[in-house]
Structure formats: C-alpha cells, structure tokens
Image: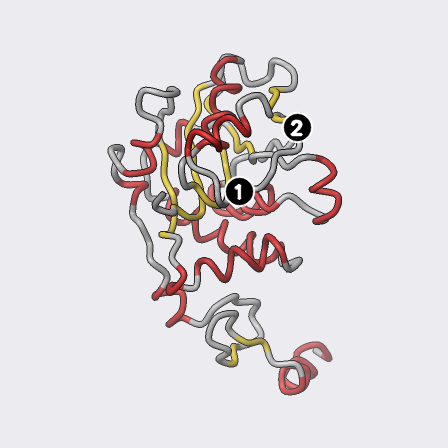
Amino acid sequence: MLTRLLSPLVHLFYPHCCELCGTDLPATGDLLCLRCWQALPVTGFHRYPDNPVANIFNGRVTVQQATATYYYTQSSGVQQLIHRFKYRQRPDIAVSLGKQTGYQLSESTWIHNIDYLVPVPLFPHKEKLRGYNQATQLANGIAQVISLPVYPKILSRLQFTATQTRKGRAARWQNVAAAFRVNGNQVNGSHVLLIDDVITTGATTEACCAALVHAGAKVSVCCVAFAWS
C-alpha cells in the first residue's frame, strides 16, 4: 500500500524517460515510448528462410535458420541503443531488446526446434572489464519470452581479437578464425540458437557456428541487428 502511494511521488522527482526521445514514461520499466518502439526498423527476417542474414552463410557453414530483429542504421535509434548496452553499462537495454526479439521469434515455426540459446562469448578479460556479456543479456531477454534455457558457457573465446568495426570480410575472418572453442560434448545432437548483437559480414558468427557444427550441433543464428557490409 505504501509503495503504491509513494510511487507517483518518486516518479515526479525521478521521471522515467524514453531512451531515444526523452518523453516522460509511466513508471512501468518501459525502455521506449510507443512511438519510438514503432519507429525501430523491424526486418521481419524470421518469417523468410531466404533472407540477407541467412545468405551470409551460404557455401561457408551450415546454418539451419538465421535472422536479425532490426536494421542497424544511425537514423533509427538502433545504433544508439546498442552503443549504450555495449559501452555505457546498460545491460537492461540488451534484455529489453532481447524480449522484443523473443516476441518476433515466437511468431516463427522453426523456433520450436531449438533446444537452447548459446550467446557469442567475450574474451574473459573484456567481459570482466565490461561487467557482463551483452550477448548473454540479449539471450536472457529472449529466454523470458520463448522459455528456452540459456547456456553461456558452451562456447569459450580463446583469443583476444581487435575490434572488427573497420575490417573487411577477409580480415575479420582471419581475426577470429581460431578464436572459439566448444566446451564438453553437450551440443552433440542438439539444435542451438546462437545469439549476438550485430551481424555485418558474419565472420565472428561464422567462426562460432563452425566450432558448434564441428562439435555435432545443428546451429541457427539470431542477432538483434543487421548492418549492411
């Protein structure tokens, strides 16, 4: 009772604002206002097996399904949100975007074939500095909607790799080719959904997929954003 009485007063002095436009929001934990949520550029790739994300892997590694939730564009706000959860200590944004991704995935038929979610790992030192792995936070948000377990320790990142931002596809692949290891034999015979934040050339994702496939898994891929390379 006291909490309900105090809540409007707390909200008056500490308003919760939309992350993109600054509009005051009800104290419900929403990330964005309805207008900004609706303005994010949804891809709809989860409905179409032959989509730009899936085509990245053609002839390179066997991927069952592949999708991304949003287009990664500077004008849409997606870039701002991703930058905040990667570099400004906002794991809550990753969880919220993960939930939106989960809602999309729940519309697909193939999601029922997935056994569990596997986040793309960070190098341990980098994760320690950041305080969390953003891909794990995304996976946690997805899991809240589609009720699948998250296994963040299935993959390990063995090497620290320099940022991929300014590298071409060949340089990105060389940068991560031997960077990942599957731990144990749990994935053998399983269908896993690999989770990451942004996919561009797909080099990091491809290296993870190759390690998982080599260990006997079927692999599908889901990223929160797709950036044209």
The amino acid at mark 1 is Ala
Marks counted in the figure total 2
Tell me the SS state at disc 2.
loop
Q: Nearer the viewer, residue 85 or 38?
A: 85
Which residue carries the number 1 mark?
143
Counting residues from the N terminus, which is met first, the one under dot 2 or under dot 1?
1
Q: What separation in Å lies between label 2 and label 1 (alpha carbons)? A: 28 Å
Residue at 30% from the left image edge and 43% from the top image edge: 45
Tell me the SS state at disc 1.
helix
In the displayed structure image, the side of residue 45 where residue 28 appears, left or right: right
Residue at 41% from the left image edge and 49% from the top image edge: 103
Q: Nearer the viewer, residue 102 or 60?
A: 60
**Residue 142 position within the rendered picture, expressed as x and y whole percent measured from the top left:** 50, 45
In the displayed structure image, the side of residue 86 where residue 142 appears, left or right: left
The amino acid at mark 2 is Gln
**Residue 210 position within the rendered picture, expressed as x and y whole percent measured from the top left:** 48, 20
Quarter of the picture containing the N terminus is: bottom right
Q: Badge 1: few (under 14), some or many (20 or more) residues near its Cα, within 10 Å?
A: many
Colouring scheme, one of rainbow, by chain, secondary structure, one colour: secondary structure
Which residue carries the number 2 mark?
159
Q: Residue 20 carries which label?
A: none
